[in-house]
Image (cartoon, helix red, strand yellow):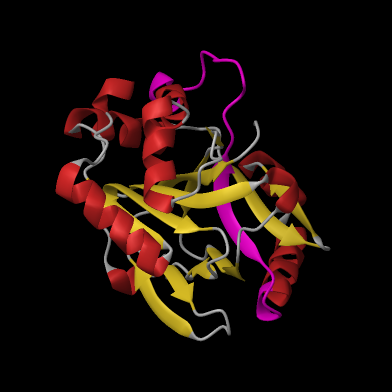
Amino acid sequence: MKTSFRIPSGEALADATQQYREEARTRVYQVWRPDVAQGIATAMASAVFYANTFHVDGRTQLATPDELQKMGPQARQQLGEKINAGAADGVGFLYERYYLPEQPEASVPEPLYGVAETLNSEPVLAMVREVSGIDDISCASMQVTRYRAGHFLTRHNDVVPAEQRRVAYVLGFTPRWHPDWGGLLQFYRQDGVPQDAWAPGFNDLMLFDVHRVHAVTYVAPFAGAPRQAISGWFSAGSL
């Protein structure tokens, strides 16, 4: 799969580098061979291992669909109210995610392990180092994410000193998306004023400095599809 990742070169690489140096972000299109990109998207859509992640009581929590179902209607309503109360104060998120087990498992579609291997390959790491100008990048973390109607991620940056994060990334695998559906990667100025936003895409790679303030806007109830992506951070040190 590593040979199927299209590392930008020449003018495309120069353009991505210039944009990143000027804006601390860039977006590269058609990064996988089309058939490989479709295989990854299919694996993500057919996966049954997502869990809901949300911020409640000052910490990140996870709950599988079965666990939420067992809570009962009243408990689920109370949980939703807590999630929304935190978000109203500017701290909150609700979406579905999946972290790959360290060792391959039969229940996990192979393409997802191929993505993790590719992102941690030296050619890709070297490309991110060149584009960003950050020389100590040595590894990439990865989570599979899915945003459905009602999901969101409030304004924040991705700085975690203990994890030595350098560059955040989003690999888009959303086949079709209308901006009115929400789910935009919204960027802000450091003072919190909205700047602009990138709509979910398919087979593209978004890179941005971890200090950049950003959010994923609320996905509308009428959204016609889930927002699918693989995201994480290129970091120094080791995973």
Horizontal relation, residue 64 to residue 120: left or right: right
15 or 69, nearer to the observer: 15
The residue lying at 45 percent from left, 58 percent from top is 208
Depicted 189 relative to depicted 25: above or below: below
The residue lying at 67 percent from left, 67 percent from top is 92
Give the quarter of the image for residue 123.
top left
Q: Residue furthest right?
A: 57
Q: Position of residue 199 (x, y in %)?
A: 32, 64
Q: Position of residue 20 (x, y in %)?
A: 37, 60
Depicted 14 relative to depicted 86: above or below: above
Q: Is residue 118 magenta?
A: no
Q: Is residue 89 magenta?
A: yes
Depicted 94 relative to depicted 30: above or below: below
104 or 151, nearer to the observer: 104
The residue lying at 40 percent from left, 61 percent from top is 25
What is the magenta range?
87-112
Horizontal relation, residue 57 to residue 81: left or right: right
The residue lying at 43 percent from left, 32 percent from top is 119
Q: Position of residue 205 (x, y in %)?
A: 34, 48
Looking at the rendered image, the quarter that the N terminus falls into is top left
